Amino acid sequence: MALSEVGIRIDYFHKASDDYLRMLGVDRIRLPAREAWFETYAADYARAIEKRETFQLVWLSGELQIGFSSVDQIEFGASARMHLHVLDADSRNKGVGARCVIESVRLYFERLKLKKLFCEPNAYNVAPNRTLQTAGFKYLKTYETVPGPINYRQAVTRWVFEPSY
Ligand SMILES: CC(C)(COP(=O)(O)OP(=O)(O)OC[C@H]1O[C@@H](n2cnc3c(N)ncnc32)[C@H](O)[C@@H]1OP(=O)(O)O)[C@@H](O)C(=O)NCCC(=O)NCCS
C-alpha cells in the first residue's frame, strides 16, 4: 500500500457503523482524526524498512481495491502482528480473504524477514478466526487484552504462523 492509498484504511474505520466497529473490537472515540492519522503514516513511511512501525498491503482484484492487510508490533527479522479486512461486505465469505491472507503472509515474511507472524482477532468475530485457520495459522490461546490504541479491552484469540521449513 502506497502512502497515497492509506486513506483506504483511515476511511474504512471512520465510515464504519458502531455495530461494525464493535464486531472488530474498535472504539470510535479512540480513532485518530483523519489528518493526524495520515501524518502518523507519513512519518512511518519515511522510515527505513527495518525501523517501520507498520507495514500495509492493499488487496487488488485487477485494478479494484478489495481489501487490505497491515502489520504492527514489528520486530524486524523476528515477528509482527497482522490485521485483515475485505472492504465490501458482499465480497466477504467468498474465498477472497483466505487467498489474500496467504499471499500477504508470504510478502510480510519476505519484506520484514519474519520468523513468526501473529494475529489476534476478537474472539467472537468468527470470520477472521476461521480464515486464519484456513490460511495455516495455529491457534495459541484466548485471553483478555487491549490489543491496540484504537481498541477497548476484549477477549482475543492469538494465532501464529510459522513456516514449516
Ligand atoms: C475476516 C475477513 C478478511 C475474511 O475474509 P473472507 O473473504 O470473508 O474469508 P473467506 O471467504 O476466504 O473464508 C475463509 C474461511 O472463513 C469462513 N468464514 C468467512 N466468513 C465467515 C462468517 N461470517 N461466518 C463463518 N465462517 C466464515 C469461510 O467459510 C472459510 O472457511 P473454510 O476455509 O473452512 O471454508 C473478512 O470476512 C472481513 O473483512 N471481515 C470483516 C473485517 C474483520 O472482521 N476483520 C478482522 C479483524 S481482526
Image (tube, grey):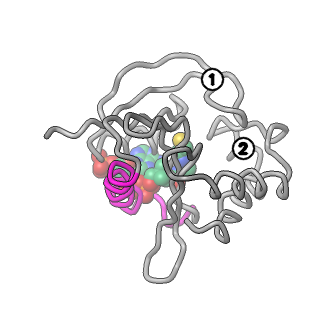
Residue at image location 46% in from the left, 39% down from the top: 126
Report the side of 30 relative to 107 (left or right). Answer: right
- On screen, residue 15 versus residue 74, left or right, reads right
> As displayed, is residue 35 above or below residue 161?
below
Residue 40 screen position, x and y as percent: 74, 50
Mark sitting on residue 154: 1
Ligand 1 closer than 8 Å to label 2 CB:
no
- Image position, residue 76 (x, y; %): 44, 40
Question: Closer to the camera: disc 2 or disc 1?
Answer: 1
In the rendered image, residue 99 lying in the magenta stretch gets the answer yes
* Quadrant containing the C terminus in the rendered view: top left
Residue 19, numbered circle: 2
Q: Amino acid at mark 1?
A: Gln
Q: Quadrant of the N terminus?
A: bottom right
Q: Earlier in the sequence, mark 2 or mark 1?
A: 2
Looking at the image, which is closer to me, 148 or 40?
A: 40
Q: CA distance from mark 2 to mark 1?
A: 15 Å
Magenta region = 89-111
* Residue farthest toward the top in the current orientation of the protein: 143
Magenta-drawn stretch contains 92: yes
Q: Residue at x 57, y 16 (%)?
A: 144
Amino acid under disc 2: Asp
Q: Is residue 108 above or below residue 160?
A: below
**SS at mark 1?**
strand
